[in-house]
Image (cartoon, grey):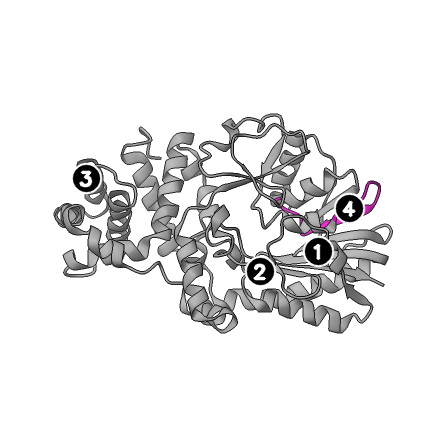
Amino acid sequence: MAEGRPGGIAPRQLALELLQGVWEERMLLAELEAHPHFTAAPPEVQARAARLARTTLRLSGRADAALKPFVQRPPRPGIRALMRLATVELLAEGEAAHGVVNAAVAIARREQAKAAPMVNAVLRRVAEGGREAWDKAQPQRLPGWLRGRLGAAYGNARVARMEAAFEAAPPLDLTPRDAGALLPEGQALPTGSHRLVRAGQVSALPGYAEGAWWVQDAAAALPARLLAPRPGERVLDLCAAPGGKTLQLAATDASVAALDISEDRLARLRENLARTGLSAEVIAADALNWQPPAPLDAILLDAPCSATGTIRRHPDLPFVKDAAGIKPLFGLQARLADRAVEMLAPGGRLVFCTCSLLPEEGEAQLAGLMARHPGLTTDTEAVAALPGLQPEWHAGPGALRTTPEMWPECGGLDGFFIAALRKN
C-alpha cells in the first residue's frame, strides 16, 4: 500500500488505482474503496485519493479535450488515466505544475517506464496551453444506452443540463435527528435538510459524535417525510440499507422494522442506529418471502434500481453499468411493490421510490402498480402537506420527480421518483 503525505505521490497513486478499477475493470468505487488495499492507507490519503478519483471521473471529457492536441497516439489505458488525473489537477484544481508533473512522471516510471518522457512533455504542454480546449469542451457525455433513454423521456436539451450538473461536486446534505439537533454551519433547506457546501471530514463535524444528524441527500430525505409515520404505528422500511430513511422513520417514535436482504449492508444501518440513539428492529431477509407478524400501517419501499439519479455523487456509475444490468431490476421493482401492497393493512400507506432518472423505474412502475391493484389510490394530501416542495417537482397526483439540474439556486439535488399511495 502506498503511504505518504496527503499532497504527495501516495494519494495520486491510490486515485489512479481507483480510476483503473472503474475504467478497466468496471468496478464501482464503493467496492474498490472497501478493499483492504485502499483501507490500509492513512485516512487523509484515502480522502484525497477518493476526491481526486471522483473529480477526474466527472471531468474526464474536459481532460481528454485538453490532452488531445498534445498526444499523437493513444497511450495505454493506465497512462491515459494518469494523464487525465494530472490534467484535472492542473486545470480544475489549479495545482502547481511542477508538483503535478513530477508526481505523474514518478508514477509513470512505475506503470510504464518508457512512457515517462511522453507524460512529462505532454503534461507540461497542457499546463502551458491546455486551458482553452478545457474551457470549450462539453461536459462528459452519458453513455449512449442511458443518454438515449433520457433523451426520449426529457429531451436532449434537458439531458445536456443534467450532464452539466453531473460535472459539479455536490454539497453535503444532512438530516437532523430532531428540531434541536446540533448542526454544523450551513444552509437550512426549505424541505428540512441541512446543506454544507464545504464539509471536510464528516466525522469531525459538530454533532456527528452525538448522533445529531446523518448524511442524506435532500431528495433522498423526501420519501420518509412523505410517509409521515405517527407514534405507535407499525412501519416497515423495505430494502432499508444503508439506513438513512430508517433513521428518519425511527425518529418519529413509530414502531419501525428495517428489512434488507444484505446482512453486510445492514451492519452500517446498525452502526448509525447506535450512533444516533434511535431504535428499530433490524431484519435480514428476502422481502419477497418475508411475512410480517401483522398487517402494517405504513411501508416505505426504496426499491433497488439503476441509481442513475445519483450520478453527481457517484460519477463511476456511467462507466460501470449498462442496459443489460438494469433490465432485470424493472421486474424486481414491480414484485417488491406488489409484496408491499399485500403487507399493508386496509387504509395503510405506501411510499414507493427509486433514485433513478428512468421512467421505467418510476412513472411506469406507478402506472403498472395501480393497474394491478385497483384498490390503491394516490395520496395527494400527503404530498400537499410536505413543506418546501418546488412546483416543477410535481409529477401527477401523489407523485414527485426530481432531476439533478433542478434547484440550481440551492445547489441541486439527486434524481428521484417518489409516489404516495393508500390502500382502500
Look at label 3 and name its amino acid.
Ala
Looking at the picture, how far across and down is residue 12, in whole percent?
A: 30, 39
Residue underneath mark 4: 229
Residue underneath mark 3: 97
Ranked by sequence position, the earlier of labels 2 and 4 is 4
Which residue is nearer to you in this view: 397 or 376? 397
Q: Say which of marks 3 and 2 sits in front.
A: 2
Residue underneath mark 1: 383
Q: Of helix, strand and loop, which one carries label 2?
A: helix
Look at label 4 and name its amino acid.
Pro
Q: CA distance from mark 1 to mark 4?
A: 14 Å
Is residue 199 depicted above or below 19 in this figure? above
Which residue is nearer to you in this view: 339 or 110? 339
Ranked by sequence position, the earlier of labels 1 and 4 is 4
Ranked by sequence position, the earlier of labels 3 and 2 is 3
Magenta highlight on residue 323: no
Residue underneath mark 2: 392
Q: Which residues are magenta?
A: 228-242
Could you tell me if the residues under marks 1 and 4 are in contact, i.e. CB atoms within 8 Å?
A: no
Relative to 2, 171 lies left or right: right
